[in-house]
Image (spheres, grey):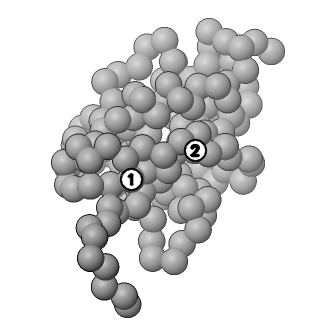
Amino acid sequence: MPTYEHHRPALTVDVALFCGSGASARVLLIRRGLEPFEGMWALPGGFVEHGERLEHAVRRELLEETGIAWAGPLRQVGTFGDPGRDPRGWTVSVAYAAWVGESAPGPVAGDDAASADWFELSALPTLAFDHDEILRCSAAVVPASR
């Protein structure tokens, strides 16, 4: 393995999974079961494994944390890398978004998620990390009305 002179961030992925439309739009969140931000709500996501493709990582994390196996299209919405976004150290997250349709699949919390649930976009809890910013950038995938 090569040695680099420069420090490198850890790579993570996050996903904003939406259902519904217009005023009834909702997003899937997990309640974190571990530090940092234990007990707070967040988007499903986590660390990319060595040699793993980003899209595989985001689908794996979604399945591990919510039990939802989303095979539909994912839209990459941005890269978030402010050095202070994660108190464990410098992480850069590649964020994805998807709209699953009008009805929401039932989540089942797993891995490091204490629980998982759908939240109306108009009534969101305080989110961990910079997930409020990721959510704002992701909202364009939600249809305004059907």
Q: Is residue 115 left or right of residue 95?
A: left
* Residue 91, quarter of the rendered image: bottom left
**How far apart in space, not on screen, are marks 1 and 2 (Cα)?**
13 Å
Please state which of residues 1 and 108 is positioned toward the viewer in this rendering.
Answer: 1
The reply to whether residue 5 is in sight is: yes
Question: Which quarter of the rendered picture does the N terminus lie within?
Answer: bottom left
Amino acid found under the numbered disc labelled 1: Val
User: Which circle, 1 or 2, is nearer the viewer?
Assistant: 1
The quarter of the image holding the C terminus is: top right
Which x, y percent locates residue 38? 22, 43
Near-viewer residue (6 or 48): 6
Amino acid of disc 2: Tyr
Residue occupied by mark 2: 96
Viewer-proximal residue, 73 or 11? 11
> In this view of the protein, can residue 66 be seen by the observer?
no
Q: Is residue 99 above or below residue 112?
A: above
* Rendering coords of residue 88 (x, y %): 20, 54
- Numbered tag placed on residue 92 in the rendering: 1
Residue 112 percent across, percent down from the top left: 33, 55
Residue 121: x, y in percent?
51, 18
